[in-house]
Amino acid sequence: MAERRCTSCNASLTNDMSSTGFKCPECSKEDVLRCGKCRKLGTKYICKCGFEGP
């Protein structure tokens, strides 16, 4: 199984207790994974379908 990484900054989510994951709000197909730092800063992510979110 591949290591889970933040969609925004590519950081490992292995020991990040503040991380989260959810389906893309636009396509509902791709998983969006967010580390605690990117969540706190509101760093932009881009889904494979092209949707951009904070």
Image (spheres, helix red, strand yellow):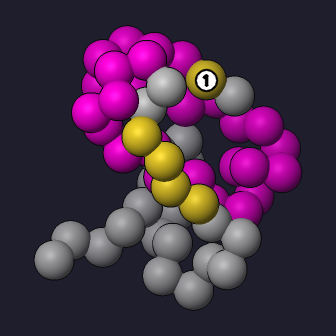
Residue 31, above or below 51: below
Residue in the picture at 37% in, 13% down = 50
Q: State which region is magenta.
A: 26-52
Indicate the quadrant containing the N terminus: top left, top right, bottom left or bottom right. Answer: bottom left
Residue in the picture at 30% in, 73% down = 3
Instruction: Identify residue type, mark 1.
Output: Gly
Point out residue 39 in the picture as x, y percentages from the top left corner: 74, 49
Q: Residues within 10 Å of mark 1 (few under 14, many from 20)?
A: some
45 left or right, relative to 54: left
How many numbered marks, from 0 up? Answer: 1
Queried whether the magenta region covers residue 34, the answer comes back as yes
Queried whether the magenta region covers residue 29, the answer comes back as yes
45 left or right, relative to 10: right
Point out residue 17 in the picture as x, y percentages from the top left corner: 67, 80
Q: Secondary structure at mark 1?
A: strand
Residue 46 in sight: no
Quadrant hosting residue 49: top left
Residue in the picture at 71% in, 49% down = 38
Point out residue 14 in the picture as x, y percentages from the top left corner: 48, 82
Residue 7, above or below 24: below
Residue 37, above or below 45: below
Which residue is labeled 1 in the image? 53
